[in-house]
Image: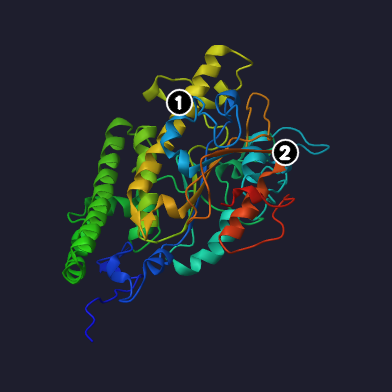
């Protein structure tokens, strides 16, 4: 008997001068006698957290009805086309973020630090930081055994703030939501070029001189790996050849836009406050960072990503949508209708930006479905009503198919003050990493299962 179907190793790489690029899952990587179920099994389940800061106007976020018949609210409307892959979760709380006797101030720091940990942080201006191990790092420790990078921690705002940022709380508590250990906050990378070099280059260095050297090179990374890519292309069938070509084109396009963004940034904002590689607008910056996340998942370079669309207390303005006012002060609206309307506009803009990423995920094949089918994305923040700094009834979505483990299209309302960490225990179960407790957890959200 003759067998013509050959299997290429899943962890195959294109290697070039200082570059290593993992291939996406191709049909040619599946063994000759593999069934459709085997192919599906080759697509791993991935976990992502997308954080939005400074609270939400909750009456424009929360659906009025529960269950499958809920209607999308103004802020959630941009996500309507993903109804079957989306759960709205109400009633979840970060009780660990609330003030304890003898404390004052720091609601944003306490919320951000508790978002993925469920731990009440230690109040400090710098020395003796203490939070908790975040759920993304718990997952990364396990899934990272199968990928080049255990996890990615990304942001849009600068995270180089030092000193005190919220009351008597260190800026370290608002610069990140990811913690490797209770005393080790994970740094967030907000420069697209630094992310690209970490994913596809020899070094994870973000030194500006290194970036400048890369910019001045005449050849792109894909030119360096062209010989290897041609070798793989010759072995592939028409479907795989098209898929690999599309993937390589996407990498080249991201590299091209990163270089363009650096050139635009240097022309329009020739100041030290804007590090090279960061686009001038929120929209392009967010798109680049989301595109890099898609490539990281598509190449199976990592299976865990934490992304802060904004840090707590961010004063970013959104002039591209007609809002020159800084974000954080707007959220302390004291009932002013004009200010509330602007916050709703910002909240909706964030949702619209996120929806564009979901569309790319849904359009990207992965195993027997799409990347969106094999992802679990927690979208939301650690504050609901920012005007009074509430940490209960949080704005939380769970998006993605979870590898067939999640039934979307529902608004699930849980009892008041249900710990947010209960959701994480459930997700850990779905990933085959059961834990009895996490932070302030009290159980699991069994209703998530199909």
Under circle 2, the secondary element is strand
Answer left or right for 82 relative to 142: left
Per the image, the residue denoted by label 1 is 317
Which of these two is toward me, 123 or 84?
84
For residue 415, the mark is 2
Q: Residue furthest right?
A: 101
Q: Is residue 271 above or below residue 401?
A: above
Q: Position of residue 312 (x, y in %)?
A: 57, 36
Colouring method of the image: rainbow
Q: Is residue 275 visible from the viewing direction of this image?
A: no
Q: Residue furthest top?
A: 337
* Mark 1 → mark 2, Cα distance in angstroms: 36 Å
Answer left or right for 71 relative to 130: left
Q: Position of residue 314 (x, y in %)?
A: 53, 32
Q: Can you tell which quarter of the image residue 69 is in?
A: top right
For residue 196, the mark is none
Few, some or many residues within 10 Å of mark 2 (<14, 14–19, 20+): few
Answer left or right for 150 relative to 110: left
């Amino acid at each position: 008997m003759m067998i013509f179907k050959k299997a290429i190793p899943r962890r195959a790489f294109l290697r070039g001068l200082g570059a290593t690029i993992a291939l996406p899952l191709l049909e040619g990587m599946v063994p000759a006698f593999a069934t459709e179920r085997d192919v599906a099994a080759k697509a791993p389940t991935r976990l992502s957290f997308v954080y939005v800061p400074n609270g939400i106007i909750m009456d424009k976020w929360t659906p009025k009805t529960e269950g499958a018949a809920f209607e999308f609210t103004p802020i959630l409307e941009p996500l309507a086309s993903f109804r079957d892959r989306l759960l709205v979760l109400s009633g979840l709380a970060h009780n660990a973020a609330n003030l304890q006797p003898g404390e004052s101030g720091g609601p944003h720091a306490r919320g951000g630090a508790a978002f993925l940990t469920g731990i009440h942080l230690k109040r400090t201006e710098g020395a003796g930081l203490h939070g908790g191990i975040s759920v993304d790092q718990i997952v990364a420790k396990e899934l990272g055994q199968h990928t080049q990078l255990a996890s990615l921690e990304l942001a849009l705002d600068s995270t180089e703030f030092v000193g005190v940022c919220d009351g008597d709380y260190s800026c370290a508590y608002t610069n990140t939501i990811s913690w490797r250990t209770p005393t080790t906050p994970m740094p967030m990378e907000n420069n697209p070029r630094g992310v690209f070099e970490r994913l596809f280059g020899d070094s994870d260095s973000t030194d500006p001189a290194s970036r400048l050297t890369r910019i001045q090179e005449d050849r792109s990374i894909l030119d360096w790996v062209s010989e290897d890519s041609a070798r793989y292309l010759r072995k592939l069938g028409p479907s795989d050849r098209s898929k690999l070509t599309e993937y390589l084109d996407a990498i080249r396009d991201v590299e091209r836009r990163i270089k363009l963004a650096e050139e635009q940034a240097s022309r329009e904002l020739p100041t030290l406050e804007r590090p090279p590689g960061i686009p001038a607008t929120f929209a392009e910056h967010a798109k680049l960072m989301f595109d890099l996340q898609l490539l990281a998942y598509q190449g199976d370079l990592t299976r865990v990503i934490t992304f802060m669309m904004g840090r707590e207390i961010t004063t970013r303005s959104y002039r591209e949508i007609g809002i020159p006012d800084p974000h954080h002060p707007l959220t302390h609206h004291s009932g002013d209708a004009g200010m509330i309307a602007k916050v709703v506009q910002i909240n909706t803009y964030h949702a619209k930006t996120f929806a564009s990423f979901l569309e790319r995920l849904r359009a990207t094949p992965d195993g027997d479905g799409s990347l969106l089918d094999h992802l679990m994305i927690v979208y939301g923040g650690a504050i609901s009503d920012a005007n009074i700094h509430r940490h209960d009834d949080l704005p939380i979505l769970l998006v993605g198919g979870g590898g067939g483990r999640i039934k979307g299209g529902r608004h699930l309302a849980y009892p008041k003050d249900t710990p947010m960490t209960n959701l994480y225990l459930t997700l850990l179960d779905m990933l085959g990493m059961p834990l009895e407790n996490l932070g302030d957890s009290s159980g699991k959200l069994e209703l998530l299962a199909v």
